[in-house]
Image: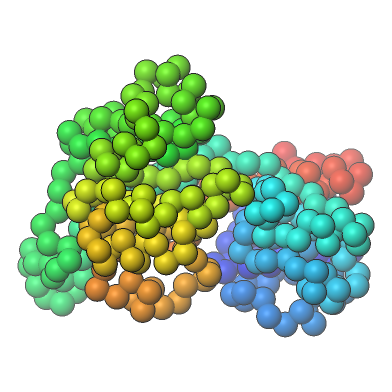
Amino acid sequence: MVIAIIDDYQKLVPGLEAFQRLRQCLPEADIRIIDKMPIADLDELVDVQYLVLIRERSRITAKMLDQLPALKAIVQTGTAGMPETSHIDLGACAARNIPIIEGGASDGHSAAEITWALILNARRNVPAYMASMVQSQWQKTEPPCGIGHSIRGQTLGIMGYGRIGCLLAQYAKAFGMHVLVWGREGSQAAARETGVELAESRDAIFKRSDILTLHMRMNESSRHSVTRDDLALMKPTALLVNTSRAALIEPGALQYALKAGRPGAAALDVHEDEPVLALHERYDGLNVTATPHIGFVEKNSYEILFEATFKSFLTFLGHEKKPG
């Protein structure tokens, strides 16, 4: 049995307890860890029977599947998503009788934490101050950052009030912020149940938020749903945060909006056309705090993610001994 785990950029998988348990369950298997970013030489995978994907790091196309003649199944950490938005060509997989084995959704804590870290770093200009200290400067930052701002008393707007949104609302209240929510029927119902203010309209959440964070589900209706016109409604002092999906925002709209000065800043963990290796070229001169899509990349989250994924995989194989 040949198994390949691709896109392990940081070489984290071999150190996971979940991975060691998988090896114990499948002692005869040839398990390969591929850390290239992204994988380009498909010759390395030509004999692979089971392909393990780390979230959405690689796109699986019909052309790629045609070059993997031994492939029996794709094992997806997390979920594969909807057919119209998935990074996997689900139709091509179905046509070739290649099943998708999913590990299930995360609990949202790691994503909420990176969102909050970005908010605090962006509002207090931590990256700029760190950079100035490296240059032997003390309490000095260059425009467009300038002096930082406290979040206490400000309004946090949350678009999409699911697991992550609810966690962020708790964080915000602990920091003395006012919380404002907008979303579909489920989000609106959850806001009422938890006693959080529901914005009077979609436009209102853009206008009223000092910090606006996006957490809508990715589907055809939400794809590119945040437009230039929406962002133009934001305050010039506002911060837009996106740790969910880059495709929620209309392509090019954020750069345009930042250049126009509404909003005044952005904090991002997701980006168009990942991996992004030249962020300065994309946001040159703009007030952007960014991380390289690490919302789910932390030890506890990885253990939970891979434990669930490998358990589903072993169940698919009909293996009696399961992790845990």
Q: In the displayed structure, does residue 76 sit left or right of residue 253?
A: right
Q: Residue at image x 13%, y 70%?
A: 142
Seen from the viewer's position, the closer of residues 103 and 208 is: 208
Whether residue 302 is visible here, answered yes or no, is yes
Q: Measured from the top left, where is residue 121 in percent x and y?
A: 26, 54
Residue 62, relative to residue 240: is it above or below?
Answer: below
Quarter occupied by the C terminus: top right
Q: Residue at image x 43%, y 51%?
A: 226
Q: Residue furthest front?
A: 229
Whether residue 309 is visible here, answered yes or no, is no
Residue 267, relative to residue 158: is it above or below?
Answer: below
Q: In the displayed structure, does residue 297 sit left or right of residue 57?
A: left
Quarter occupied by the N terminus: bottom right
Residue 50, relative to residue 236: is it above or below?
Answer: below
Q: Measured from the top left, where is residue 4 in percent x and y?
A: 76, 66
Q: In the displayed structure, does residue 259 sit left or right of residue 320?
A: left
Q: Measured from the top left, where is residue 275 in percent x and y?
A: 52, 71
Q: Residue at image x 89%, y 41%?
A: 320
Q: Quadrant of residue 279?
A: bottom left
Q: Measured from the top left, where is residue 108 in percent x and y?
A: 51, 40
Seen from the viewer's position, the closer of residues 28 and 79 is: 79
Q: Residue at image x 36%, y 53%?
A: 229
Figure disc tally: 0
The image's colour scheme reads rainbow
Seen from the viewer's position, the closer of residues 98 and 212 is: 212
